[in-house]
Image (cartoon, helix red, strand yellow):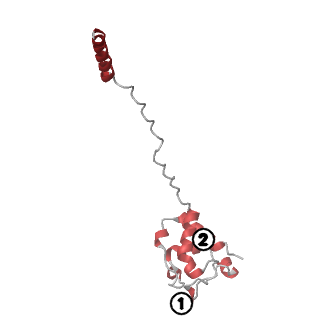
Amino acid sequence: MADARAWIPLTFIALTLVACSKPAPAPEPKPTATAAPKPAPVVQATPADEAQEIFSKRCVVCHGDHGMGDGPGAAALQPKPRSFSDPAWQAATTDEHIGKVIVEGGASVGLSPGMAANPDLADKPEVVAELTKIVRKWKK
């Protein structure tokens, strides 16, 4: 029995050491690289891009995809919209005149009031110049 009593303090000490000791800390998980995606850079539209969009949305309705004056809205107009491929008209008109018609409308130069004004382009001469280039590309 004496031998068993000798083990009691040793057992007590061993259990105390086990109970009081802290386990080794678990390694902290490494943060995953889930950074928010970078937003796409804002690309400024060039005057040529803006002019092409305007032509597609506003001008094609009457002047058509190829500037022939045959857009879907042309059927209801009298006089018919200008065909930009008319060589006599291309030779007789200036870029400044085309720009004025684009911004101020047909009535501003004695043409059809059916040619709507685009006053929002008055402060965008680069866009008007690009629209004029679009009109001129059908020159034969």
Residue 78 seen in render: no
Q: Amino acid at mark 2?
A: Thr
Residue ID for mark 1 = 76
* Between marks 2 and 1 in the image, the one whose residue lies nearer the viewer: 1
Q: Quadrant of residue 90?
A: bottom right
Q: Residue furthest front?
A: 1
Q: Amino acid at mark 1?
A: Ala
Q: On screen, 83 above or below 1?
A: below
Instruction: Out of 53 and 5, give the one closest to the viewer.
Output: 5
Which mark is first along the chain, 1 or 2? 1
Residue 97 point in image, percent of width and height: 58, 75
Q: Name the mark on residue 10.
A: none
Residue 48 point in image, percent of width and height: 58, 64
Q: Residue furthest top?
A: 2
Residue ID for mark 2 = 132
Residue 8 point in image, percent of width and height: 28, 15
Residue 58 point in image, percent of width and height: 53, 76
- Quarter of the image with the C terminus in it: bottom right
Instruction: Out of 122 and 92, give the one closest to the viewer.
Output: 122
As measured in the structure, the alpha-carbon distance from the residue carrying label 2 to the one carrying label 1 is: 25 Å
